[in-house]
Amino acid sequence: MAIQILMPALSPTMEEGTLAKWLVKEGDTVASGDIIAEIETDKATMEFEAVDDGIIGKLLIAEGTEAVQVNAPIAVLLEEGESSDTMDIDVPAVFTRPVSSQVSKIELAPSAPASATIPAIISVPSGPDWPDETPVKQQSVREALRDAMIEEMTSDPTVYLMGEEVGEYQGAYKVSQGLLEKFGNKRVIDTPITEHGFAGIAVGAAFGGLRPIVEFMTFNFAMQAMDQIINSAAKTLYMSGGQMGAPMVFRGPNGAAARVGAQHSQDFAAWFAQIPGLKVAMPYSASDAKGLLKTAIRDPNPVIFLENEILYGRNFDVPIMDNFTVPFGRARIWREGSDVTIVSFGIGMQHALEAGEKLLADGIVAEVIDLRTLRPIDYDTVIASVKKTNRCVTVEEGFPVGSIGNHLSSVIMERAFDYLDAPVINCTGKDVPMPYAANLEKLALVTSDQVVAAVKSVTYR
Amino acid sequence: MAVRKSTSKPNISPDELLKYYKDMLMIRRFEEKAGQLYGMGLIGGFCHLYIGQEAVVVGLEAAAEEGDKRITSYRDHGHMLAAGMNPDGVMAELTGRVGGYSKGKGGSMHMFSKEKHFYGGHGIVAAQVPLGAGLAFADLYKENGRVTFTYFGDGAANQGQVYETFNMAALWELPVIFVIENNQYAMGTSQRRSTSSPDIYTRGAAFGIPGEAVDGMDVLSVKEAGDRAVNHCRSGKGPYILEVKTYRYRGHSMSDPAKYRTREEVQKMREERDAIEHVRSLLLTGKHASEDDLKAIDKEVKAIVNASADFAKESPEPDLDELWTDIYA
């Protein structure tokens, strides 16, 4: 019986990859464990082994093919005596997509239903952060972050990067790809697995006049370094009467990835946003990732820069211009509307925008605001919007108690109480440690349907 | 105590010896005054006195060069005075006044002076250890030949981040001197009850960091060991550990009744091992100074300390607007 060899998922968030190279050809005999192909994920090039013994009957995907979806058949393995001529296997079109699409495309989270698509072009009435007529290119969040670091390290020799696997490994999530080669091991420093220690060393280096970028492989591991971040980095400027502080960036993926369980799936936005002395940025788009990271590196204060593993591979327009930055404390209105204000940040924006689209079917036009930075927060944009729409729903992945949404609700109540026609609703992750089981994980995460329901509630539909 | 005694002292001139005497006395008188002001309610919160340990910082400062950095824990008044910071500014910070080094916003445990290369004053036990290695990291990055004295206690020596730091400091050959001020008590817990190794510096061997124990009640031994450590670091050989065996006469903080040790134990140290008395007798027996000379120094020191107390009382409290400054640069 012929066996289909499927495109493997080689990381928790992998949805597609490049079939870089076939190491076998049709007619070759393979044994279980033989390396048959090299597959490039968005993180690394991985060797792919045969699971079963047999003869390669047919290679269904040519080497060099990009964007091969996980679980697409890539080859057929025959048993002794079988012939590939008898096989009739086509690769369904759904398993590949063109890669050089010029259309802005926002993809779906793995947990989102396949039918819920977002239109290719979302109008951005508050305008992107660059002048009209500026040429743009499609770039992933990952590449945008890398370019921000390259540009700032090029212009300021005191900027350096340290963290686990940032150098020779090229970054656990490939964000620092190429940096070691470009800047050398004096400025791109692989650390031992010792978050408390290297975070403290970086804070000391910042006291001593450098501008460190500390990469946490994920912010879950930053919990080990919390004392140095809060007590040393955030408070020293104040405690020294302004004499010395820590101009530095702590960055890395934050929040849930996919199926990695409770200890690796937590959004720390609200934790860090509580601390005076820290600044906190949490970009959604690639242009914001780039512009905000450049601002963060130049900022004379410690900045917590919360990235998202699922967003790393997403493509957005990024302007082709010198010295592009995005200021802290300025929200971006992604969609203008008059019926309800949806406020979010980071990956929450994906659910907010999806919900905004779905609500159109019910004739509800939502205004969707991306806060972009959580310290400082652009309250004015939110308040102005709520005064217009009279209703507000907040969206975030983090836990409900003491959330950013809770805080915004309080500010809205203080500053726009008389304008509210309904209570503010906070859509958050559920108040549970992240479960592993796929169905439970999906249930624990905030979804666009949850946002739609909240909007219907505040608009009394 | 398995410590190295100072064997030869030919390199110390009478003038230097007099300076050590004066600097140590300054710290002691300052701390006694601080204790007094605490009792009067002029200093609040936590206040950790350095009395008994003066030879450690005075000996090591004698081994430092201009531009070298220092960082320590919350028991920091002595380090600041030894680094040349103004006693007025230190005392006024203790009283929470605007004339203090942090404009009254840091307090006893959180003081800094960029000018004197003093990087705090840190209130979380052992947090200053990676920070100190980070200062050394910056100096190595800038290739400026500076070294950093990173002070911590025998209590801090049981924190994990110390060993995380030892590993990286050795790996990257950072010019950092780890000074373990072993005063034998981690707050109220004796070293015997808290620490597996009798000599803490030997833990450096696991990371390939050389080190030694030093008699911290003998300023000459400290200076001599400091020179060795500095030479090692400055020549690019990486970190060095000095475990300086010392003793604090007062409680852990002003609110510590110190019931965990006997009055006799403290009295014995004061009478037999006092660092200031030791230098005093060296000066007198070596005929480098007369009783009258030393009396004059005592008087001078007392005047400086009294002036600092006056300054600290008269300096106004910070303006209320200061609540909102220095949060962001």
Image (cartoon, coloured by chain):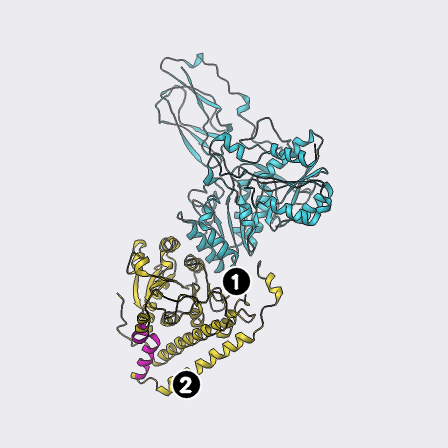
Amino acid found under the numbered disc labelled 1: Met
User: From the viewer's perspective, is B45 left or right of B8?
Assistant: right
Q: Residue A49, position in %: x, y?
A: 39, 28
Asked if one can make out residue B91 in the rendered structure from this viewpoint, the answer is yes
Q: Residue A259, position in %: x, y?
A: 47, 34
Residue A78 higher or lower than A259, as above or below: above
Amino acid found under the numbered disc labelled 2: Ala
Mark 2 Cα within 10 Å, few/some/many (few <14, many 20+)?
Answer: few
Q: In the figure, what tint was chain A given?
A: cyan
User: From the viewer's perspective, is B262 left or right of A169?
Assistant: left
Where, by quadrant of the figure, is residue B157 drawn? bottom left
Where, by quadrant of the figure, is residue B32 drawn? bottom left
Query: Which residue is nearer to you in this view: B264 or B185?
Result: B264
Q: Residue A383, position in %: x, y?
A: 69, 46
**Separation of marks 2 and 1 at Cα, in angstroms:** 37 Å
- Looking at the rendered structure, the secondary structure element under dot 2 is helix
- Residue B208's disc is none
- Residue A239's disc is 1
Residue B150 higher or lower than A220, as above or below: below
* Residue A20 magenta-highlighted: no
Q: Which residues are magenta?
A: B269-284
Instruction: Name the quarter where the N terminus of chain B is drawn.
Output: bottom left
Query: Which residue is nearer to you in this view: B90 or B51?
Result: B51
Asked if one can make out residue B210 in the rendered structure from this viewpoint, the answer is no
Instruction: Name the quarter where the C terminus of chain B is drawn.
Output: bottom right
Query: Which residue is nearer to you in this view: A199 or B255?
Result: B255
Q: Residue B234, position in %: x, y?
A: 37, 64
> Magenta region, mostly helix, strand or loop?
helix
The residue beneath circle 2 is B296
Q: Which chain is yellow?
A: B
